[in-house]
């Protein structure tokens, strides 16, 4: 469907473009077509999912509408609202604190606060629930202390628990993006605001925060999509959301088509949100004349030092130290019984997949961002947004969409080969790492795209004009001018993608080659049989592996 | 220049890909490919024993049932899978209904696996039995108070019952079997009674439910017996006791984990051999040992710990009902407000 669009739009655009340099014309087709090609790769599995609307599943819709759908929609609304708001507050405040101020432990906190991201959210959920619910050590101690079996402590189940855990698991997305914004410009803005007679607080709310909006909104979008797609965490709390309804239709009512129809609604909803977000952004103009780094930070004094330090510590404690300590206690119990040489294999598989996927997704994201920079017409923007939709779908539903698409391509290819050479070659893509990498691209392009896109938005267009004046266009404009400016955004994207790919489960489960187990697969295999203490071992390994990109990132931003 | 390079790279990737496939899946007969929803730690020992005995290699992958079924469907006649293994009867029934499994006849399987535990057309066979039973806190419940699943709807259990979420297939199968026995209307009354008696919101897993009983939050719960076995193995001092319900009428509800040969299996003989082996004494003993389950083959005894829980009457209902009535059961639980 995208075949004809680019041409006539391209014609329209080059007519309207003000300075069509001759070299630009030569490169026009590549940059023009790139977003549409990428979008169609993502679109194929999504169309597979949406095509389910032609299969009737009326009885299931009728049943859902009569029973659980209203409460499920309400639950989903509150969950999204709570998680996104909570993550924005937590992520932005911590980012401001570590980017602008100096307090004891700041350097440690600035990278450690990313660590909660490395634990799959449902593992954090299980561990935190285990610590805080009725049978957990805290409530047990309180009961023995008060000497009563009283139920005066509210159950940790349901909405509050799910929101709390997801805020703790997802705030790093916003933290990382907002920190990037504040580091590259926050200090200078505060100085400018102060020179205009504003207090530091006013400077934050009136200048730095609005200027960081593309980053914060980008992080909030990722958080929202992740929340909508989540199944594991809400299951631990038995909190019914739209995604649990999708899985119920599929796994319990045996109707993959009803599940896909529900998922299609989710896609449409997310697409609407994306369009609204884009409209909001379009009204904003961000410009930055040069990339500058904070060289020295404002030291906090007196009680503020302590307050900053304890705030950062308490978040880190609940979100990471507490669940990790529990995992460590379990892992130490298991280490003699269950560790074997296969763990090295799991680790190598996890790292290999994450590294290759990060390289691919990062490059494609840069390509998309740059293409929209060159051609900021509506069609290109929509194509790019479509390319990021894969992140909002529940993983297993997307996995099926991707799997069906790949199987179809393989079948077609086989038929051609059969016709030409009269041999059966079997599956060419399916069951290979290439299938996994395509699937990861579809799933995680949003994670790579948002950080780089936000960084690009703040690069003023006058730079491009000036560079063109010196004859730089296409690849050379990208590599000589934009890539250096975008580097911190690219590093941010790479870190997020790396960690996300490493903890991904449903797609990895469905597309991995035989025997190609990763740490995340190991966690799934053990937890799905309730062997949580054994699962602690691969979970700890996953956290340690997640440290690699985080440390690399911090080295880069702390220079 | 750039486009030339990328075309070359593309060709290289394609060639690599082709060679990889030829290396990865040689089509020799001494191999059988399994899609298993039973997780690695509970099935690999049996595969290893099979390879030792027959020399046939077992290649397998694990995933959730729904994903494996969707995968078989998408792969169609090109599927590499020869055998599908699940951990409940409902999904085997659904796989058969969707035409993903093949009818096979094997005198060995028919002799080893009772009629109740297999598909009449031979599309799937139970390999181990899992009993869904009651576990109570011995400090708070006199066993004479307990009798049946249905009795848990009695107001005398108000605020004393804990249940796992209705989203788990084990509860769906149980309710499906109750519908087969009592009809929908009566079953809905019973499930509503359970919900009214709950001490707390439905919990996320069987072990958690037992921990709640042990901690005194509630007095009794419904779990698969192997979860009881695992929990008591690590915490032998918990005040938990197992109780076999419905002994005076239809018997305790059972489910199976089982297997079938796929419709488009490329190694059918080897696949049947694997199923036969899994029903044999050697593998059935492994099933008994790895997970406190009951062997499907009635000639094989469960492990000593499981035997110590006492003998009990199992419900004679055919496993087919669990599949046929699963969707009805799920809808019923939604209506009854059982989350």
Image (cartoon, coloured by chain):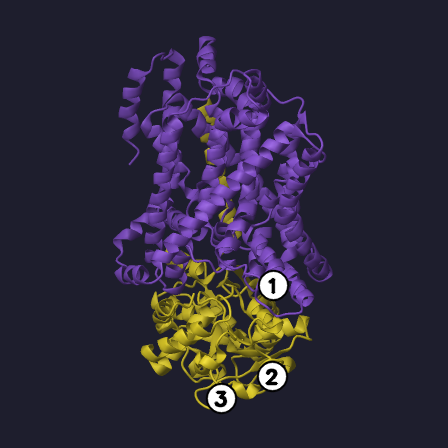
Image spot of residue A237 (x, y percent): 51, 59
Task: Name the chain under label 1.
Answer: A
Say which label, 2 or 3, has the lower sequence index: 3
Q: Looking at the image, which residue is at 38% across and 51% down?
A: A404
Question: Mark 2 sits on what residue?
Answer: B309
Task: Name the chain under label 3.
Answer: B
Marks 2 & 3 on one chain: yes
In front: B264, or A314?
A: A314
Q: Quadrant of residue A56?
A: bottom left
Question: Mark 1 sits on what residue?
Answer: A531
Task: Name the chain under label 2.
Answer: B
User: Looking at the image, is B138 positioned above or below residue A338?
Assistant: below
Judge from the rendering whether residue A559 lies leftward or rightward of residue A84; answer left or right: right
Asked whether residue A302 appears in the rendered view, the answer is yes
- Give the spatial CA distance, label 2 vs label 3: 14 Å
Image spot of residue B275 (x, y percent): 50, 73
Q: Which chain is yellow?
A: B
Q: Looking at the image, which residue is at 59% across and 31% down?
A: A96
Question: Mark 3 sits on what residue?
Answer: B247
- Give the spatial CA distance, label 3 vs label 1: 31 Å
Where disc 1 sits, the SS reads: loop
Which hue belongs to chain A?
Answer: purple
């Amino acid at each position: 469907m995208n075949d004809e669009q680019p041409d006539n739009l391209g014609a329209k655009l080059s007519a309207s473009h003000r300075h069509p340099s001759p070299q630009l014309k030569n490169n026009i087709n590549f940059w023009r077509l790139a977003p549409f090609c990428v979008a169609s790769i993502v679109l194929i599995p999504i169309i597979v999912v949406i095509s389910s609307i032609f299969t009737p599943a009326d009885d299931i819709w009728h049943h859902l509408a009569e029973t659980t759908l209203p409460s499920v929609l309400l639950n989903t609304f509150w969950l999204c609202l709570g998680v996104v708001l909570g993550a924005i507050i937590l992520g932005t405040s911590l980012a401001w604190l570590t980017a602008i101020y100096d307090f004891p432990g700041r350097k440690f906190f600035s990278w450690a606060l990313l660590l909660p991201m490395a634990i799959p959210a449902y593992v954090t959920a299980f561990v935190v629930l285990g610590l805080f619910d009725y049978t957990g050590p805290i409530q047990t101690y309180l009961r023995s202390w008060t000497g009563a079996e009283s139920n005066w402590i509210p159950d940790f189940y349901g909405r509050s628990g799910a929101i709390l855990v997801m805020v703790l698991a997802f705030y790093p997305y916003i933290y990382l993006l907002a920190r990037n914004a504040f580091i590259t410009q926050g200090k200078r803005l505060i100085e400018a605001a102060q020179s205009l007679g504003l207090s530091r607080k006013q400077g934050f709310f009136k200048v730095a925060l609005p200027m960081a909006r593309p980053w914060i909104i980008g992080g909030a979008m990722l958080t929202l999509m992740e929340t909508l797609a989540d199944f594991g965490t809400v299951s631990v709390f038995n909190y019914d959301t739209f995604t649990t309804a999708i899985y119920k239709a599929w796994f319990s009512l045996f109707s993959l088509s009803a599940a896909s129809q529900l998922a299609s609604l989710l896609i449409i909803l997310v697409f609407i949100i994306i369009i609204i977000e884009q409209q909001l952004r379009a009204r904003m103009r961000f410009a930055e004349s040069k990339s500058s780094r904070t060289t020295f930070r404002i030291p906090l004094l007196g009680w503020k030092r302590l307050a900053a330090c304890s705030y950062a510590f308490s978040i880190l404690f609940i979100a990471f130290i507490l669940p990790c300590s529990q995992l460590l206690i379990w892992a130490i119990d298991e280490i003699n019984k269950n560790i074997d040489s296969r763990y090295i294999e799991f680790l190598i598989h996890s790292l290999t997949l994450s590294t290759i996927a990060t390289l691919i997704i990062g490059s494609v994201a840069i390509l998309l961002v740059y293409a929209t920079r060159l051609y900021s017409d509506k069609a290109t923007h929509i194509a790019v947004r479509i390319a990021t939709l894969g992140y909002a779908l529940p993983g297993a539903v997307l996995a099926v969409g991707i799997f069906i698409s790949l199987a179809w391509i393989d079948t077609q290819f086989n038929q051609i080969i059969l016709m030409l050479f009269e041999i059966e070659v079997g599956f060419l893509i399916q069951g290979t790492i290439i299938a996994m990498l395509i699937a990861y691209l579809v799933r995680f392009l949003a994670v790579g795209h948002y950080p780089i896109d936000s960084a690009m938005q703040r690069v003023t267009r006058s730079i491009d004009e000036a560079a063109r004046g010196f004859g730089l266009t296409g690849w050379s404009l990208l590599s000589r001018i934009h890539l250096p400016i975008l580097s911190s955004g690219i590093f941010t994207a790479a870190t997020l993608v790396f960690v996300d790919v490493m903890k991904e489960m449903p797609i990895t489960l469905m597309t991995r080659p035989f025997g190609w187990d990763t740490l995340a697969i190991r966690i799934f295999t053990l937890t799905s049989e309730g062997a949580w203490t054994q699962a602690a071992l691969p979970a700890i390994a996953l956290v340690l592996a997640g440290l690699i990109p985080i440390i690399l990132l911090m080295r880069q931003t702390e220079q | 220049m750039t486009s030339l390079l990328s075309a070359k790279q593309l060709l290289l990737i394609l060639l690599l890909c082709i060679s990889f496939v030829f290396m990865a899946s040689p089509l020799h007969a001494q191999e059988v490919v399994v899609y298993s929803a039973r997780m690695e730690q509970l099935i690999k020992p049996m595969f290893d024993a099979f390879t030792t005995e027959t020399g046939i290699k077992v290649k397998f992958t694990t995933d959730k049932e729904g994903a494996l079924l969707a995968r078989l469907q998408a792969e169609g006649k090109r599927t590499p899978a020869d055998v599908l293994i699940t951990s409940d009867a409902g999904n085997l029934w659904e796989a058969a209904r969707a035409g993903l499994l093949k009818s096979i006849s094997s005198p060995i399987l028919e002799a080893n696996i009772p009629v109740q535990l297999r598909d009449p057309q031979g599309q799937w066979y139970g390999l181990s039995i899992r009993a869904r039973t009651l576990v109570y806190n011995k400090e708070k419940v006199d066993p004479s108070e307990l009798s049946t699943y249905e009795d848990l709807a009695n107001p005398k259990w108000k605020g004393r019952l804990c249940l796992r979420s209705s989203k788990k297939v084990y509860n769906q199968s149980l309710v499906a079997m109750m519908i087969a026995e009592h009809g929908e209307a009566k079953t809905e009354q019973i499930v509503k009674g359970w919900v009214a008696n709950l001490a707390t919101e439905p919990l996320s897993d069987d072990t958690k439910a037992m921990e709640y009983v042990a901690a005194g939050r509630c007095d009794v719960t419904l779990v698969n017996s192997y979860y009881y076995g695992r929990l008591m193995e690590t915490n032998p001092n918990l005040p938990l006791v197992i109780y076999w319900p419905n002994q005076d009428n239809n018997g305790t509800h059972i489910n199976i984990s089982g297997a079938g040969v796929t419709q488009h299996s490329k190694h059918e003989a080897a696949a049947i051999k694997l199923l036969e082996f899994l029903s044999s004494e050697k593998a059935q003993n492994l099933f008994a040992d790895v997970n406190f389950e009951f062997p499907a083959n009635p000639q094989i005894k469960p492990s000593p710990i499981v035997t110590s829980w006492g003998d009990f009457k199992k419900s004679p209902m055919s496993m087919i009902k669990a599949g046929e009535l699963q969707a009805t059961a799920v809808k019923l639980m939604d209506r009854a407000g059982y989350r």
